[in-house]
Image (cartoon, rainbow, N blue to C red):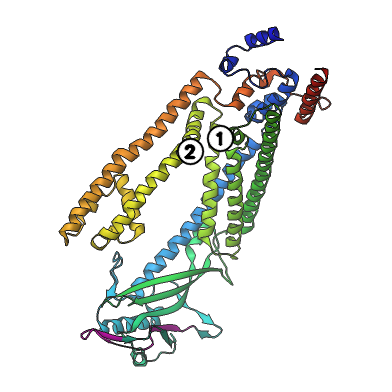
Amino acid sequence: MNLLQAVNMEESGDLYDVYESNGPPPWAEEDLDNVECLRRKIKYYFMNPCEKYHARGRKPWKLVLQIIKIAIITIQLVSFGLSNQMVVTFKEENLLTFKHLFLKNYVDGGRDTYAVYRQDDVYDHIDYIIEQYGLLHNITVGNHEYEKHGAFYTPLTLCQEFYRNGTIYSGNETLEIDANVKTECLKVYPMSHPSLRATLPLLKLHFKRMLSVKITFVLKAINLQTVRHRELPDCYDFTVTITFNNQAHSGRIKVNLENDVDINECREWKVTGASARDPYLTLLFDGLIIMTCVTSFMLCTRSVISGIQLQHEYTLYCRDHGSKVSFSDKLEFVSGWYILIIVSDTLTIIGSILKMGIQSKVFTSYDVCSIFLGTGTMFVWIGVLRYMGFFRKYNILILTLRAAFPNVIRFICCAGIIYLSYCFCGWIVLGPYHEKFRTLNTVSECLFSLINGDDMFPTFENMKQKSSLVWIFSRVYLYTFVSLFIYMILSLFITIITDTYDTMKQQQENGLPISELQKFLSVCKDLPTSGLYRLDRNRRFSFNCCINRCRTTQERMTSEA
């Protein structure tokens, strides 16, 4: 028996040199037929599609399906993006149009600066809005119309929100106020043709107690630009809300205009001179994508289940032979690429269903649909890296990312704690003196920009010098943050990736197995073209048979002893 072991070790070359100090592996003395049964089964599972084709003549249907899926999903995304771009452009231009029509003396680019400061100005602006709304047909250059319910137009609604009761005397520093909010509303019909200024005496604004004044009305429009792209026009309902915000009671009433959009299918339409694109072909194409993703989902799910079953068999084998499978080896059987494709298929299916609903005018949630389709397409293209990993020179990138991921996560957790500490400190101390530190969100964005070397000088320059102590603190704060994150933390992050890359490159060049699973599989020298993987149906084996044979052999040897 010792002589046989020596011969086997001599034939195996350097493979068993790894175990000279730790003793032979648990499978060294096992019957080769039983061990090779499991080795070839696991090795076949980890083969790429080309190797599986040479091994058993298995057609790479999954690879072909992924290539087709990438092409049709990209076409779908581009088509939806172009259509969505027209919708977004139409909504944004209408929003800008409403601001010019209904906000007095509005100027483009006046972000967060449109406000009124006098009582007469508030009345004047409200009167201007009502007047422009009544003259809409005579002033607009678009196809905007009033909303109708039956034979009647929908009125403009003006609502004032204010504290129910209150007496405020700032000079005496006394106040008495009821915190309950009361709302008063006034309706103005556009086609009644009253004296618009005569309606204003019906409205009395309680400036000292006023929280806000909201003017709401609905306008309709048709997006005709889709005709040029062989698409049927959509009908839009714009719910315009103009808000006079006085919640701060600072003497400055901010004025803001917003619109909510509802997209509907036009009731009657007739387009001549251009052939409209058949919507049923688009729906049929989306249905084809759904079927393709469902097929891909099923195939990848089956592969994941097969990997889990094979992991269970390998774990059972090692347990029967006194060894324990590490967690990293168990993860080898669960392909992250398959899980990524499953998630991508799920997102694409949901996005395609939403897209079909949008084209049928059942849904109008363009944003939700774009999130699902965009994320699904992103994951589909990332999944291409799996097939790039079959090439040795490209595989080093994927191996580096996978090996460095745990260290990167731990590093980000530590660096994130320092980052959050700077965010909270900057928000509290510098917020009153710097517009980029007013909220936690803007603080985080500002600091992240500084890490990337962007907008550094304006961040230093825009610091108000009202307080010398705070100004000195801001310099210490910014200099330490930039020095710490750019020169130390960012350099350490790059070092982690670089060290992992060098380690993986060295291991790939040396060709030594680095895990127990790879050591176990390295004993099998059968090539995919050897023909040993092409098993007869009558001679097809399963690992359960191997386990039973191993147990029978052990019981026989025990009884003989």
**Who's the residue at 24% across and 50% down the image?**
477
Mark yes or no: residue 90 visible: yes
For marks 2 and 1, give the CA distance. Answer: 20 Å
The residue to which callout 2 is attached is 406
The answer to whether residue 173 is magenta is yes
Instruction: Say which of marks 2 and 1 sits in front.
Output: 2
Pointer 1 local density, CA inside 10 Å: few below 14, some 14–19, many at least 20: some
| SS at mark 2 in the image | helix
Specify the label residue 98 is tagged with.
Answer: none
Question: Residue 200 placed where, x, y %?
Answer: 35, 90
Please tell me which residue lies in front, 105 or 476.
Answer: 476
Please tell me which residue lies in front, 419 or 154.
Answer: 419
Q: Which amino acid does label 1 sit on?
A: Arg
Give the position of the C terminus as an image quadrant. Answer: top right
Q: Which amino acid does label 2 sit on?
A: Pro
Image side of residue 400 versus residue 247, left or right:
right
The residue to which callout 1 is attached is 386
Question: Residue 82 placed where, x, y %?
Answer: 49, 54
Question: Residue 154 placed where, x, y %?
Answer: 49, 83
**Who's the residue at 25% across and 46% down the image?**
480
Q: Label 1 near label 2: C-beta < 8 Å?
A: no
| SS at mark 1 in the image | helix
Q: Is the magenta stretch mostly helix, strand or loop?
A: strand
Q: Which residue lies furthest to the front in this view?
A: 561
Chain-order first, disc 2 or disc 1? 1
Image side of residue 110 versus residue 31, left or right:
left
**Who's the residue at 23% across and 83% down the image?**
173
Q: In which quarter of the image is residue 90?
A: bottom left
